[in-house]
Image (cartoon, rainbow, N blue to C red):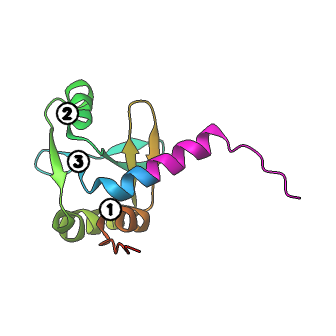
Amino acid sequence: MHTFHPISKELFFKITILKTMMYCGVLWGLYRDGWAMSNDGEDYIFPFWLNGLQAHRYAKKHWPHYTPKRITPQDFEVALLPTLTRIHATPALYTANKKFKLTTAQMRHFFFTPRQFVIA
């Protein structure tokens, strides 16, 4: 007989975020003559949000000269992905109280890969 152990709050949070990310279909970044980036210790961070209102609130408090902009698949492939790759920036989903870092490959998979739904 197998014994199941409860998962940690951190793992539960990550699973919940990943599920939400896969179905939201819309991402938001901050923009002003280019996408906003920050520095997290030694890493460049590209912050993004699942919700335009959250992005607006963050910009108002931290980057008042930037405005929320929807990240389209074309924006991601043509402008954002090459820049993130070139400067080795880490995409990070910002939520109300957490920052969830991803790789660019994970970002592409969860947000910009067309979904195939099978109906049984």
Foreground label between 3 and 1: 1
Q: Quadrant of the N terminus?
A: bottom right
Residue type at numbered disc 3 = Trp
CA distance for labels 2 and 1: 20 Å
Residue 106 placement (x, y as % from top left): 43, 64
Residue drawn 41% across and 68% down? 105
**In the image, is 101 to the left or to the right of 46?**
right
Residue drawn 27% across and 31% down? 58
Q: Residues within 10 Å of mark 2 (few under 14, many from 20)?
A: many
**In the image, is 40 to the left or to the right of 28?**
right
Q: Nearer the viewer, residue 97 or 89?
A: 97
Residue 87 placement (x, y as % from top left): 35, 61
Query: Element at badge 3?
Result: strand
* Range of magenta residues: 1-18
Determine which of the numbered discs, if any, sits on residue 111 in the image.
1
- Label 3: which residue? 28
Q: Nearer the viewer, residue 91 or 109?
A: 109
CA distance for labels 2 and 3: 9 Å
